[in-house]
Image: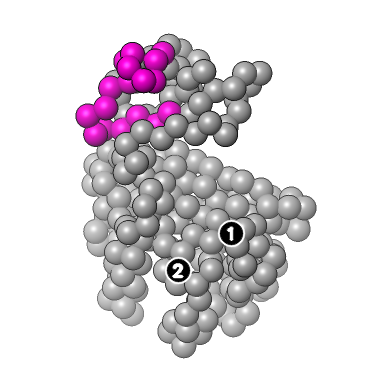
Amino acid sequence: MEAKLRTIVLLLAVVGVGFAANILPNPSFEVWLDSLGVPMPFGWLTSEYLYSGSARRDTLANSGNYCLLLNGGDTSAFATSVTLVRPGSHYEFVGHARVPGLLGGSFVLQFLSLLGRPVGTAELLPVFNSAFYRRYSRWVTAPDSAVLLSVSLATLPGAQVWVDDVTVDDTTIAGVADDRRLRYGPGLLHKVVVTGVGFEAAGGETGLLFDALGRRSRGRRPGVYFRR
């Protein structure tokens, strides 16, 4: 059983690396297959394999046509996917959840070794009551011994959670991304992602940058900066 689960984890990881800056497969749960004899979203392992009706396709989507509906019932419902990571690289996790109850559960981010053993401490992002989809995000850096990143959402018993648009962006793939749609504070700031691909943001096209604390920076190290 352990060998079978390890094989599934590695297959999910391989599937996830071919999707542009986002490295998670099927982030909007649009593609469903009859996996392991039960319907599951492509690239994901869900509790439907253990408890029928606990993880199913639904049309109350944040985007696209479908989403994943987790029904806790008497036990926890879950969905998990795994992707390959590079030690020292920075990743941005974003997930969207709609929770009719007070507290639905939590997104869980856990780096793993090649053998699937936990590396470091898991990052927990509790999902809580919202009439519409709420956006949850977290920046993480892969530890030196990490090879995989597991992304999961587990509900509390009895909780019901709609999940959609779950992504992990590898900031080293795109080089430099300038997002003009984001607004921070009273003025319009552009988000600039500087990565370790030989780019230096001192002067040049990007001009003066600021870090997340508002300090001036030349952006010589990989990270996220902002400019006017």
Q: Give x and y (percent) for residue 35.
A: 44, 82
Q: Quadrant of residue 54?
A: bottom right
Q: Is residue 194 magenta?
A: yes
Position of the N terminus by quadrant: bottom left
- Pick the front one: 129 or 215: 215
Is 155 situated left or right of 108 in this image?
right
Which of 175 and 104 lies nearest the eye of the viewer?
Answer: 175
Q: Main secondary structure of the magenta part?
A: loop
Residue stretch in magenta: 192-208
Q: Amino acid at mark 2?
A: Trp
Percent across and percent down for residue 212 are 48, 23
Q: Nearer the viewer, residue 228 or 211?
A: 228
Tell me: 95 left or right of 139: right
Residue 122 part of the magenta segment: no
> x%, y% of residue 85?
30, 50
* Residue holding disc 2: 44
Label 2 SS: loop
- Residue drawn at (62%, 58%) of the image: 63
Is disc 2 surrounded by few (<14), some (14 to 19) or many (20+) residues within 10 Å?
many
Above/below status of 211 relative to 126: above
Residue drawn 39% across the image and 15% down it: 207
On the picture, is 37 further left or further right than 102? left
Q: Amino acid at mark 1?
A: Asp
For residue 158, say whether it is visible. Answer: yes
- For the point 33% across and 20% down, the residue is 201
Judge whether residue 50 can be spotted in this image. Answer: no
Q: Which residue is mark 1?
A: 164
Q: CA distance from mark 2 to mark 1?
A: 13 Å
